[in-house]
Image (cartoon, rainbow, N blue to C red):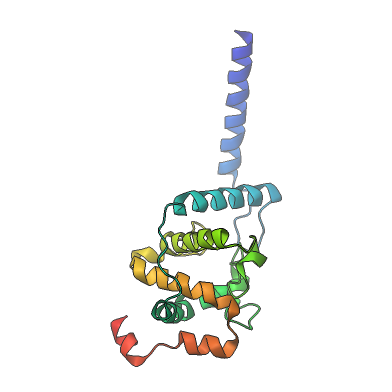
Amino acid sequence: MKQILKVLLLMLVTGSAGFAFLYSGIYPMGADSPHTSLTYWALETLREHSIERASRTLVLPDLSSPDLILAGGADYNEMCSACHLEPGKRGSDMSAGLYPQPPNLTIPPFLHRVDDNSERTSNLAREQFWVIKHGIKASGMPAWGKTHDDQRIWAMVAFLQQLPRLDSAQYQILTARGNTEEAHH
């Protein structure tokens, strides 16, 4: 019985300390002040595993379709490049001001965090689709699925598969939106 009381007391003290911390306002929430290493690790681990689990069952379309890549390029340029950059750019005012900093999608994905193999590439494409569609809470990444259908999101993913291979001139060609396309968006 004494052990149970000790455990309950410990839970009460820990819970009270947690509530005191939450309501104290002492944790810095500004995007210009990084998280503690423990907080950062916990958030990164939660995000990575959540996205991996949620995207696991998505069915990949043929991401090599030139029409899909072209359609995704224009959207990437208009909606994503301010944060995730263009070939040849190392940063932007937008990307510098975000915390955590958005990944530079112009570099190969394996330089971000993964090995370069076909299974991992497929998983990465599924994860990219999920992130574009649903966004990421408290990161600045919007949920484009509220305004874009799945086909349009897969087009952005198709473009992302090509982006690390593009130079600035190729990027400009693949991201130009024709006048007839502008009327449809």
Residue 55 sits above or below residue 155 on the image: above
| Left or right: where 117 falls relative to 172 | right
| Residue with the most extreme top position | 1
Front-lying residue, 72 or 3 = 72
| Quarter of the picture holding the N terminus | top right
Front-lying residue, 36 or 102 = 102
Residue 120 drawn at (x, y percent)? 57, 59
Count of marks, rendered view: 0
Residue 178 drawn at (x, y percent)? 37, 90
| Quarter of the picture holding the C terminus | bottom left
User: Is any atom of residue 156 visible in this view?
Assistant: yes
Q: Which residue is drawn at 29% across and 86% down?
A: 183
Q: Residue at x 37, y 64 (%)?
A: 145
Q: Residue at x 53, y 76 (%)?
A: 162
| Residue with the most extreme left position | 184
Residue 3 sits above or below residue 50 on the image: above
Residue 94 drawn at (x, y percent)? 57, 74
